[in-house]
Amino acid sequence: MTADVQTGAGAPKAGSFAERAHLALDDKPLRANFRRAMDGLMAKRAAQFPDAADLAALRARGAAIKERALARLPDLLEQLEARCTGNGIKVHWAETTDEANRIVLGIFREHGVKTVVKGKSMVSEEMHLNAFLGEHGIQAIESDLGEYIIQLAGEMPSHIVMPCIHKNKGQIGALFAEHIEGQRYTEDVDELTAAARRVLRDRFAEADAGISGVNFAVAETGTLVLVENEGNGRLSTTLPPLHVAVMGIEKLVETLDDIPPLLALLPRSATGQPITTYVNMITSPRREGEKDGPREVHLVLLDNGRTRVYADPELRETLRCIRCGACMNHCPVYARVGGHTYDAVYPGPIGKILTPQIAGLDAAGDLPHASSLCNACVEVCPVKIPIADILVRLRREAVRPSASNAVKGAGGGWTLSESSAWAGWKWLHANPVLYRLGSRALALAGNLIPAGLPPLKAWTSVRSKPKFAPRTLHQLARDKGFDDA
Amino acid sequence: MSTPSAAVPPERPETVYFFGTCLVDLFYPQAGLAGMELLKRQGLRVVFPQDQTCCGQPARNCGFFEEARAVARAQFDAFPEPWPIVVPSGSCAGMMRVHYPQLFADQPDRERAEAFAARIYELSWFLVHVLDCKLADHGEPVTVTWHASCHSMREMGVTDEPKRLLRSLENVTLVENPRERECCGFGGTFSVRQPEVSAAMVADKIDALRSTGATEMVTGDCGCLMNITGALDRMGGKAGPPLRGRHLAEFLLERSDDR
Ligand code: SF4
């Protein structure tokens, strides 16, 4: 079996969001793939939540659970560590992705691991773990079908739940025919799934270790909860003798009772399923007398900027995210340009607030501006993250960093011309007399402004120039005898 | 975004303020005038303070909070009496109702901002819930479609109100736009920062509007109106049958005008 697997994280695309968007918008099949998929996902989610009041109550509950856990995060992390250790799970702490990678590598080296099967995990994407392991002679095979496909293609996920949603059947058929030995080109989904299963089955059997993410970790019991649909997560965490789970420190809840409401929200928000096929709850390595399960389980807890986000009460709400992807499914920008345009591990609305907070505004400062602030993401987020407000907060940080210096690279995003334009705008609009004079002048002569000037130029690229009315409402209201006070 | 303003309708006042918004002031004054006229016909005294300018949303959305606050403060001064403030734009209403309290959260004049915010109403919501407005239809039969603004829906909680007003008109057939809940791509500075994404959004919106077969698109926000009609105008006749865009207030006033 020689599935040719690339372990690279996908070639980064240069330039700004707008430049990458230009390429994506030109890609007709890509646009069609996303549009079709997102329309379907929106309809499926809507069908899962027919009652607005029920949904509102459930979201309030979901948000409260995560908020409660975050309020006690430091304590709960200690509790989690103690419980896990007590259960026989070895716990490791990593401040940076590099540290996390080295911890995983260390564990593997100690056990002489050569091949690894991986369940889907966004934190491992954040770490670029596959590439790192590959550089050190360890091959990690993605076992989630979507992740497997993009691994074959050498790409990054374009969605956090459905990593290869940007590809259609034909593209996947071609990829399989090229990379999987003995596989003919077909668009038959069952045949393609069977081909991947054939490859992966052998990998499961021969793997020295399994890697997984964690959807929720329960501090009370030290339980790692994993939600999945294909059974690959279960295989990755039970078949090999060694299991390493990686998770961001925010994925914590207090008690087991917190899990059912979150499970009622996650798959319905994500894929419009009432529940996923598999919910795995891992509490320890194989115990005496048990017939399966790994001999050793490790948990790597990754910070990677999260404590910095945590320190600011407004930004902290970002950490409630349960990674359902509903915000991207409903985002009109994401639906047009797809996940790769964001050039970040986390795309879409959550990515637009998370990436600049983790990577800094110098690196990802244009992401908060890639939104029309339409609030569709805010409306659907199952844990009620005020994404739009955080986007604006980050825009504000770029203009004037807050005293707490909460966001890396703050204060570097504005240009002199932009801030002087806003200073002028303020001067005009905070002075009623000036405003009346200025607006009358625009009514008289505004239409003479050439369409080629900067903000108008972008506007008029697809729209006609807006026409100033000959008289302002201020003037007309006075003419018509409306009282002034 | 806090919860949509599921505001409890206040008692019917004698006097209301009208906040025109800067886009209406400069580009669509007839829509503003129509809004004031509709309120006046319901027997209210409508006051239009000449000192009003802009809600400050453009600066706030770009992160220039100090500048936005300075402009917001000028509005507090311009609307001193405790009367309701009616706004013919869900977006500016959302700025003042939802975002002023946030914008002033750590400011000495926070209470003033909150009191001002509590007086803000979107026009169609006010017509329906406070005035229980009934309109006679004197117009020719026409098929229209409604374009909902994102902030009207999601910040002001205005969803069915404009459609109720439209449906109440005898000769008006309302056809639902299949992408009603999707943004038209204006988003203030978004349309100039991401012109191509915005263009794709407005093109899809126009397809959806055209698919209804309506000849009129009615909306409650002049930002969306400018974006959609500007793109329609640029396409000319080539992309389909003529579709006219108008602000709800102007449309309602014209049809119910028996003079
Ligand atoms: S921000 Fe909300 S909607 Fe988006 S992925 Fe996270 S939980 Fe889901």
Image (tube, rainbow, N blue to C red):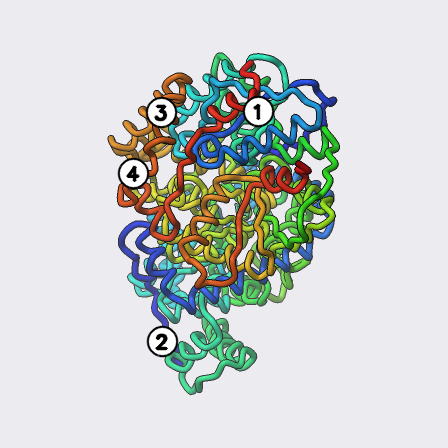
Q: Residues within 10 Å of mark 4 (few under 14, many from 20)?
A: few
The chain containing the residue under callout 1 comes to B
User: Is B97 located above or below residue A188 in the figure?
Assistant: above
Give the residue number, with chain letter if any, for mark 4.
Answer: A449
Distance of mark 4 from mark 2, alpha carbons?
59 Å
To the question of a shared chain for discs 4 and 2, the answer is: yes
To the question of a shared chain for discs 1 and 2, the answer is: no
Residue A197: horizontal and vertical position, in percent? 52, 76
Give the residue number, with chain letter if any, for mark 2.
Answer: A4
Give the residue number, with chain letter if any, for mark 3.
Answer: A438
Tell me the quadrant of the picture where the C terminus of chain A can be found: top right
The CB of the residue at mark 4 lies under 8 Å from ligand 1 = no
Asked if the residues shown at circle 3 and circle 2 are in contact, with their CB atoms under 8 angstroms apart, the answer is no
Q: Name the disc covering residue B18, or none.
A: 1
User: Is A202 located above or below residue A326 in the figure?
Assistant: below
Asked if the residues shown at circle 3 and circle 4 are in contact, with their CB atoms under 8 angstroms apart, the answer is no
Observer-side mark, 3 or 2, equals 3
Image quadrant where residue A19 sits: bottom left
Residue B187: horizontal and vertical position, in percent? 45, 42
Distance of mark 1 from mark 3, alpha carbons?
21 Å
Tell me the quadrant of the picture where the N terminus of chain A can be found: bottom left
Residue type at numbered disc 3: Gly
Mark 3: secondary structure = helix
> Which residue is found at the position 72% from the left and 52% from the top?
A50
Distance of mark 3 from mark 4, alpha carbons?
14 Å
Distance of mark 1 from mark 2, alpha carbons?
68 Å
Q: Name the disc covering residue A330, or none.
A: none
> Which residue is found at the position 73% from the left and 23% from the top?
B12
